[in-house]
Image: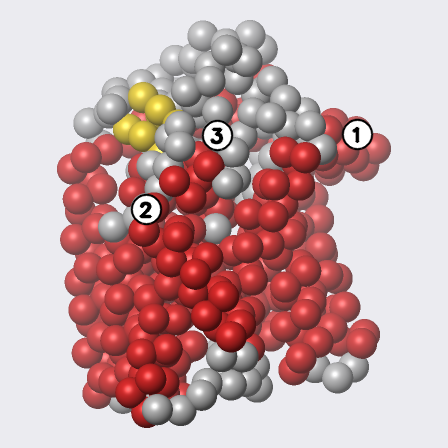
Amino acid sequence: MRWFLAGLIVAMAIAAVYVYYTYTQFSGLKGYVSDETWYAPAAYNILKYVFRYNATMEYPYPNASGIEAYLNLEHPPLAKYLIALSIAALGYYPLAWRVPGWAVGGLAVVLAYLTGYELLKNEGEDVAALAGFLSAVVLAVDPNFWALHGIAMLDAYAGFFSLLALYLLASGRRLSSSIALGLAFATKESTFFLALPYLYYIGEVEERPLRRLLYAILIPAAVYVALSSPLIIYLGPMGWLRDSFLHMISWDVTSGHIAGNAESQISTPWGWFLNIHPFYLGEDLYARVNVAVMILWALLTVAAAIVRDKKLLMVSAFPWSIWAGFALVYALGNKTLFSFYVSDFSPMVDVFVPTALVALLASLERGGERKGSLR
């Protein structure tokens, strides 16, 4: 317990510095940065039209057609609810719509520590604390997550809730994890693909098929629908199905989310591994990726397969499922993908890589073969 608490205190200190540095770097950015043009007004409009709450509007709408009624129905609503809560409390201006992302960033650093520790706690408290500490550090220096959590974008929220679902599942809290998976679903549709490794994981630890379906599909879907219910009431069930859910699916497999000649902004899922065409967010911010971590993710997945470590393989499979989802929509016709999508899964990668390295090195030191169990 001593190592765990010491590591947790250090992780919380890193998170505090992370949040403070975020404030110093992002609080001075004026106006809308990148897709804040869409998400901040959508959050305000959800307050105004869906919840009938008129927050103080201290900043004008961006210059975009139809923005005064735009609800961003092509993506799930949870992140916009969180942004809307901040706007309701503080008013409509840049600091207000960015604050929730800063909080999510700090919480993600602590969560990375807890996840790394949980995954290796059977290896000994000191080894687990080292894995947790390194996970927190790797996430804190993740350039993609750093850029995305600082502004009002959906991707850092998706990455956080995905990591939360993984942590709770690895710690054996299946119901809580299932609810967290639903929160991820309600944040961004890219996380829907997590249902596949989640279902497999549950199948390894839960013998009853109905329980597997309950945890992996039914509860998350219920959370998604419950959080969408204000929009369902506002639009009507068929209106929501047509204008939000089905529109979302169509949007995701369609090219044209940016001008086709903006080649320097468009990237591919395999190009992310080499930081090819990092997306320019504005204000000298780029959605860069940590090439070393991405390549180690691929190599360590192979290593975990060779030593037959089921737990490490499953941890790796969670981010791979989201990556594969982006590869699928690319194959289905959406050729305008962007590097900032990496933040949807990079927090899980940031935990997997140092945890796998520590686990494999500990195994080599013992001179034994790892066969990590999910139980």
Q: Secondary structure at mark 1?
A: helix
Q: Nearer the viewer, residue 69 or 282?
A: 282
Residue at figure coordinates x 52%, y 55% from the top left:
319
Q: Could you classify mark 3 by the number of other residues whose Cα lies within 10 Å: few (under 14), some (14-19), or many (20 or more)?
A: many
In the rendered image, the residue lying farthest to the right is: 238
Q: Quadrant of residue 5?
A: bottom left
Q: Could you classify mark 2 by the number of other residues whose Cα lies within 10 Å: few (under 14), some (14-19), or many (20 or more)?
A: some
Mark 1 vs 2, N-terminal side: 1
Q: Secondary structure at mark 3?
A: loop
Q: Is residue 24 visible?
A: yes
Q: Is residue 185 visible?
A: no
- The amino acid beneath tag 3 is Ser
Residue 204 in the figure: left or right of residue 146? right
- Quarter of the picture containing the N terminus is bottom left
Mark 2 vs 3, N-terminal side: 3
Residue at figure coordinates x 40%, y 28% from the top left:
277
Residue 43 in the figure: left or right of residue 189? left
Q: Nearer the viewer, mark 1 or mark 2?
A: 2
Task: Tell me the residue that label 1 is attached to.
Answer: 242
**How many angstroms separate mark 1 from mark 2 (CA)?**
38 Å
Rendered location of residue 123, percent (x, y): 36, 88
Picture layout, residue 304 above or below residue 372: above
Task: Tell me the residue that label 2 is attached to.
Answer: 290
Rendered location of residue 237, percent (x, y): 81, 36
Residue at figure coordinates x 48%, y 72% from the top left:
304
Q: Nearer the viewer, mark 3 or mark 1?
A: 3
- The amino acid beneath tag 2 is Asn
Q: Secondary structure at mark 2?
A: loop
**How many angstroms separate mark 2 from mark 3 (CA)?**
15 Å
Mark identifier at residue 267 = 3
Mark 3 vs 1, N-terminal side: 1
